[in-house]
Image (cartoon, rainbow, N blue to C red):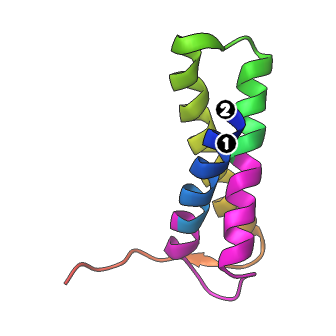
Amino acid sequence: MYLLAWIFIGVLVGWGAGRILQGNGYGPIMDVAMGIGGAVAGGFLMRAAGFGGVGGTIVTTFVAVICAALLTVLFGVANGRRIYARQRT
């Protein structure tokens, strides 16, 4: 059950981070894949650290979001993509 939640979080965060990054990259599929990888890795690390059960679900989900965003953004920046602030109209 946790794995499915982490994958869903990774898809959402990877897609969102990919929308923020501009430039020549690998595209939305790679952004989503990096988000899933980061979320699953962060989730498993927190579960291995002993954060489980009902209270640990919130902590594990939060760390999965953070790891997915970091992995997607850092991978994009390392490959020469730029982050631009979008203007609201």
The residue that disc 1 covers is 4
Helix, strand or loop at mark 1: helix
- Check residue 29 in the rendering and tell me which mark sits there, or answer none: none
Q: In the displayed orientation, state which residue is furthest to the front.
A: 1
- From where the camera sits, is residue 77 visible? no
Left or right of 70 on screen, residue 86: left
Left or right of 61 on screen, residue 75: right
Residue drawn at point x = 58 percent, y = 71 percent:
18
Amino acid type at circle 1 is Leu
For the C terminus, which image quadrant? Answer: bottom left
The residue that disc 2 covers is 1
- From where the camera sits, is residue 54 visible? yes
Q: Position of residue 60 (x, y in %)?
A: 61, 27
Q: In the displayed orientation, state which residue is furthest to the left.
A: 89
Q: Marks 2 and 1, how far apart in space? A: 5 Å
- Is 7 placed above or below 83 here? above
Residue drawn at point x = 40 percent, y = 74 percent:
85
Residue drawn at point x = 73 percent, y = 11 percent:
50
Q: Position of residue 32 (x, y in %)?
A: 67, 65
Q: Position of residue 83 (x, y in %)?
A: 53, 73
Pointer 1: residues within 10 angstroms few (<14), some, or many (20+)? few
Rendering quarter of residue 14: bottom right
Q: Are marks 2 and 1 in contact (CB under 8 Å)?
A: yes
Helix, strand or loop at mark 2: loop
- Is 85 placed above or below 22 here? above
For the N terminus, which image quadrant? Answer: top right
Residue interval drawn in magenta: 16-38
Left or right of 23 on screen, residue 71: right
In the rendered image, residue 33 lying in the magenta stretch gets the answer yes
